[in-house]
Amino acid sequence: MFLGIDIGTSGVKAVVIGEDGSVCGQGVAPLTVSRPHGLWSEQAPEDWWRATEEAVLALSPDLRARVQGVGLAGQMHGATLLGEDDRPLRPGILWNDGRSFAECAELEQRVPDSRAITGNLAMPGFTAPKLLWVRKHEPDIFERVRCILLPKDYVRLCMTGDKASDLSDSAGTLWLDVAARGWSETMLSACGLTRDHMPRLFEGSAITGKLRAEVAECWGMAPAPVAAGGGDNAAGAVGVGVIKDGDALLSLGTSGVIFVATAEFRPNPDRAVHAFCHALPGMWHQMSVHLSAASCIDWGVRATGTNGPGAFFALAEAAGAASVPELFLPYLSGERTPHNDAHIRAALLGMDNETDPGRIAAAVLEGVAFAHADGMAVLREAGTTVEELSVIGGGARSRYWGTILAAALNVRLAYLEGGEVGPALGAAKLGMMAVTGASAAQACTRPPVSHAIEPDPALTERLVPRLSRFRAAYAALKSL
């Protein structure tokens, strides 16, 4: 048995798989986000550890007792600042925090070739500009920083006592030379940091340590080895077999991602395409990232007073695709690809006296699909060909939404059995590889396809003018 732990934004998920990769048990524990000021998004690192223990202990004692190895996945970019005693100095600053937009420009001015080194635009979501913000606005805290960890790696510290990270997650800090797969002294120095502030780097399937005796005893497990793991998207890709050049997935979690595995480093920073290391040795990946996906469904449920996502999807289906006048711009937390705009916010346009919850629901589903169409367009501009997307994440549960997404993106969607498990599955498989020495081809097989959705040409044609309106609406909203 192998345990995968995913430290997400809305909760921690723990999954146990057998040696054949099948899911044997799951445990979950919720998390909340604090937004004390505009553009801010924070969580207490201690809450990640509390939720991790809760999720693991929700698994049956029998499964826990049989775990041979552990892998970690987690939300990327979060800045966890530790002092001399390895305790957090302040709440963690999350991936969807937008306060450091000015520091992004400052960082690129300090390092004119930063895009060549990191393969990415400097964006407020990344870790490096967050540290420039802390240095400027909280200098007393900055002076006390001795180590900076990503969210899953803080949990690793609690589990094993080791300060370590993997390359896929660390690529999202803007401190990594992504092509060379190592820390960049230039990028660190621009933030007033050195390698001494950074954890040791490992490939995702390498062992970084083992469970501390007291943790193993509490969890009812042996002191199992812990693999480096991966950032949430890379781990999610490992879980569903997106491991070869050209393999691609669509992740519909709190945020939305189109992820394409590449055999070489292929950046396109000027269009806000992300280019990171994969969680597997010798592999990289491209991503278009949208800061709001399933979070828009949660917002829509609250805004319409609907009884949960299932009812919300049913309302949208009853209203019909490409048939309502309303237009939703899904920028609840700003946007990354292709706009790199921390300030843009969501909007619901075209309402009239007949607007009702069903029409709002239909507009929300289309709006998220249009944001992903924007992302797919810039991936194609970079020379990436995508013919099929494997679908994972909580949003994968709705077939109806899939028909809209397939038509808007004009690609086939393959829904995989267990795809909703997400990054925790990939983390467990990385743990399996670390312990057994299995290759990626052996451990990271693609789950069976439960069903597929082909793009409907007629629906694609009806969505084209609405997508044009959507793009024009972003430009108009930005001007305000």
Image (cartoon, rainbow, N blue to C red):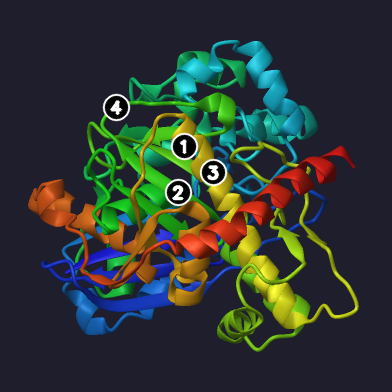
Tag 2: Cα neighbours inside 10 Å, few (<14), some, or many (≥20)? many
Give the camera-side residue of 377 and 244.
377
- Label at residue 375: 3
The residue located at (90%, 42%) in the rendering is 480
Kindly identify which residue carries mark 1: 379
**Callout 1: helix, strand or loop?**
helix
Mark 4 belongs to which amino acid?
Glu
Q: Amino acid at mark 3?
A: Gly
Q: Are marks 3 and 4 in contact (CB under 8 Å)?
A: no
On residue 264, the disc is: 4
Amino acid, disc 2: Ile
| Vertical placement of residue 465 versus 139, above or below | below
Q: Is residue 345 left or right of residue 63?
A: right
Q: Are marks 3 and 1 in contact (CB under 8 Å)?
A: yes
Q: Is residue 100 visible?
A: yes
The image quarter containing residue 158 is bottom left
Disc nearer the start of the sequence (2/4): 2
Nearest the eye: 158 or 254: 254
Disc 3, SS: helix
178 sits to left or right of 23: right
Check if mark 2's residue and mark 3's residue have beta carbons within 8 Å.
yes
Q: Residues within 10 Å of mark 4 (few under 14, many from 20)?
A: few
**Quick one: label 4 or label 1, which is nearer the N terminus?**
4
- The answer for how far apart the CA atoms under marks 2 and 1 are is 9 Å
Q: Whole-Å distance between the Cαs marked 4 and 1? A: 15 Å
The disc at residue 258 is 2
What residue is shown at x 60% (from left), y 59% (from top)? 463
User: Which element type, helix, strand or loop, lies under badge 4?
Assistant: loop
- Of label 2 and label 1, which has the lower sequence position? 2
Distance between the alpha carbons at the discs numbered 2 and 4: 18 Å
Which amino acid type is marked by label 1? Leu
